[in-house]
Image (tube, grey):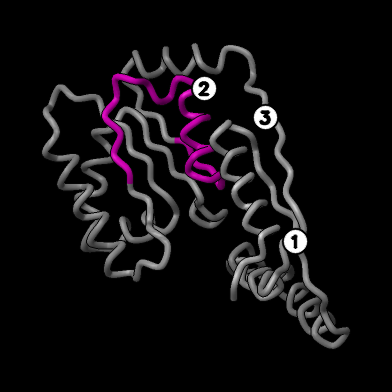
Amino acid sequence: AAQSEETANTLRKMDEFAKDGLRVLCVGGRHLEKTEYETLLAKFKEAEMSNVDRAAEVEKVAAQFETDLELWGATAVEDQLQEEVSDTIASLQEAGLRIWMLTGDKVETAINIGVATSLLTNAMHRLMMVAEEGKNAAAVSDSVAMTCRDGRAQPASAELALIIDGVCLQAALLPENQPAFMELALRCSAVICCRVSPEQK
């Protein structure tokens, strides 16, 4: 379906906000018929009572609710860092600790937070594993494998940072990619996992 000018403008603004390091939330919804609502509500209550993998079951039902949504608007707020976060992270890295940041934020927001907290520095060579829109699973897996090879090719003296999204993380943890991914991740001073689901966290 074609995007309205209003939707396109909102999405453009959301990208600008994210690049400015703001926490961006979009607001949307859709009309549910009473019978559809009652069916989904019953499934949701059943998922909440599940004794096995409750979070995953609730997420599955939520995914059924969250389809065909109409974008109503967006908000952007500054998420202030706690005092001395930047200095603390820098000290931990100097001590040789490898730090991972896991977030549901967009890639741009996550990178800005990484820079603001000193998790990412200008001296680091950044490796990007971010799935392109519309790529199939095989193409994503190939892209992950290629980035792992690129990381291995970096000189031993290079300080590496890895930025990976949830789609690529799923591919990176496949049996054929996991050994190379873990080798690369363990070599990185910082790893930022963005657009990850609660289950992946």
Circle 2 SS class: helix
Residue picked out by circle 2:
116
Give the residue displayed 42% in from the left and 35% down from the top: 100
Q: What amino acid is found at the position of numbered circle 1 in the picture?
A: Gly
Which one is nearer the viewer's eye here, 72 or 8? 8
Q: Which residues are magenta?
A: 101-128
Please identify the residue farthest to the front as the structure is shown. 5
Callout 2: 10 Å neighbours few (<14), some, many (20+)? some
Residue 79, numbered label: 3
Q: What amino acid is found at the position of numbered circle 3 in the picture?
A: Asp
Q: Position of residue 107 (x, y in %)?
A: 48, 43
Task: Judge left or right: residue 175 versus residue 79.
Answer: left
Circle 1 SS class: strand
Q: Is residue 17 above or below residue 58?
A: above
Which one is nearer the viewer's eye here, 185 or 165? 165
Residue picked out by circle 1:
28
Q: Quadrant of residue 33?
A: bottom right
Callout 1: 10 Å neighbours few (<14), some, many (20+)? few
Q: Is residue 78 above or below residue 139?
A: above
Give the residue displayed 32% in from the left and 43% down from the top: 128
Q: Is residue 136 above or below residue 91?
A: below
